[in-house]
Amino acid sequence: MTSVTKQKIAFTILGGITVLVALPVLLIVGVIVKHGLGAISWEFLSTAPSDGMREGGIFPAIVGTCCLVVTAVVVAVPLGVFAAIFLNEYAGDNWLTRLVRLAIINLAGVPSVVYGLFGLGLFVVVLKFGASILAGGLTLALMNLPVIVTASKEALDAVPQTFREVSLSLGVSKWKTIRHLVLPNAIPGILTGIILEVSRAAGETAPILFTAAAFYLPGLPQSIFSQVMALPSHLYAISTQVPNISLETRYGTALVLLALVFIVNSFAIFLRARLRAKRRW
Amino acid sequence: MTDLATTPDHIQVADLAVSYGRHPALGPLSLTVRRNEILSIIGPANAGKSTFLRTLNRMIDLTPHVQASGQVLLEGEDVLQMRDVAALRRRVGIVFALPLALPLSIFDNVAYGPRHHGLVPRKEMPGLVEQCLRQAFLWDEVKDRLKEPALNLSGGQQQRLCIARTLAVRPEVLLFDEPCSGLDPVSTAMVEETMQELKSDYTLVLVTNLTAQAARVSDRTAFFLSGELVELDDTAKIFTAPSDQRTEDYIRGRFG
């Protein structure tokens, strides 16, 4: 067998495996769109459920998920980015930073239902936030922190050390160097972490099940202390606890959740591409 | 206190010793840098040349576990005791071995320092940038494309941009750390010409691996070997009649 033929065979196998990896994603999206598209209507998107969830729409759940994601991002992004700046730029290599790094790696591996229980214990019960947007958003933020810290730290680390040296050698202070030179060059990488976590925050059921989600609420949340409906928990509820509900409604809900995540991700990816286009090193 | 402007010594180094952890890198050594001279430092690798240079504006602080003892007096003020390191670095600028343009436009590279120090009002920034680029002999080559990314420039142009950027914060001393190590002969000649011109306004310390470069541009030359100052004298004397055998061996290319 010539080396060219060998190479062709290898490429074919690798290509086939790559397609296999993409296949489940395509299938999932395909099935959800096929069964769910019929349910999508203006009424479905803009009204509350009625008739014990069997009729009406999912508007409160859409609003609820948006509120939870925004709260989680508003809390987790500054915390995560500042922690990453501290770890990467200021903290040296000592037992404390090693402990923090170890904690972050382990936190990333904690199952989401454990975050849910922790949120229930801390935010709902001890801090008396009740089941609310605040409690659910904070729980999601905790879950998001490890990935945001890790991604941000790697993005900061990828900015060449020489940039910092040049800036410091010009007598620019360390904080100004970070703020005006290092951080702008790390933003695309930091955005990648945030993108990942927005999807997770929007999609996770377990962390909000005990901390924020209501089975049914006719109205919209009034404040961050209101309980809310959310898309993933709503999907869970109508799939397991409401008999005789149409398949279309379930898949329609899943489709809306998917679309929501897709829209947020596309925007962030677009933003990242624009920022990256400006950078050349 | 004596009138500082009348003393010829700009920097007085006394018993300076630097070590990285347990490894001594330099000294103890003493020398002076005179106002408006070009002092070259030559010597083989691991001679402590760069360590010496980076001590003068405390860039060694960025290296972990570094320790420096002795005195480095800049206009009578001890650099090693200074608390405001940023202010020191504005007075003692450095040009690195590799042309390190920042990922900004040509204009913004030069304006980077003055902008952060609020050195001039916004309206006067273009004037300052032009002045610095002229001083670095780069203006004619870039005046029509100041908004272009600096990384588009050639290596030699980038190195002159780095000189302009260092000049823009209005230092009094300029340190050059092998500024021509990555440059072709034509660019090297331009950088050397720039240094000659700058001498009238600044004090220059040049670390170089090119002994011929030291002979061409500097007033005095110091020879470092294994962290020790072997000899410091007028460049003409060092290159014609050095007092130490080791200096002669190095210049004649017998080792190093």
Image (cartoon, coloured by chain):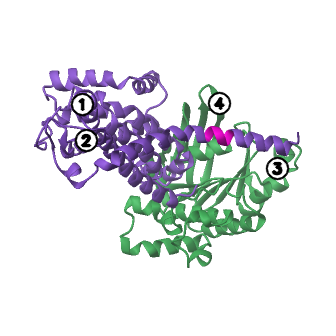
Chain colours: A purple, B green
**Which residues are drawn in magenta?**
A14-18
Quadrant housing the C terminus of chain A: bottom right
- The residue under label 1 is A237
Contact? badges 4 and 1 (CB < 8 Å): no
Identity, as a three-letter code, of the amino acid under mark 4 = Pro
Q: Are marks 4 and 2 on the same chain?
A: no
Q: Nearer the viewer, mark 3 or mark 2?
A: 2
User: Which label belongs to residue A65?
Assistant: 2
- Camera-nearest residue between A41 and A225: A41
- The residue under label 3 is B242
Q: Quote the CA–CA distance across marks 4 and 2.
A: 61 Å
Identity, as a three-letter code, of the amino acid under mark 1 = Ala
The image quadrant of residue B176 is bottom right
- Judge whether residue A164 is colored magenta: no
At mark 1, the secondary structure is: helix
| Mark earlier in primary sequence (2, 1) | 2
The image quadrant of residue A5 is top right
The image quadrant of residue A62 is top left
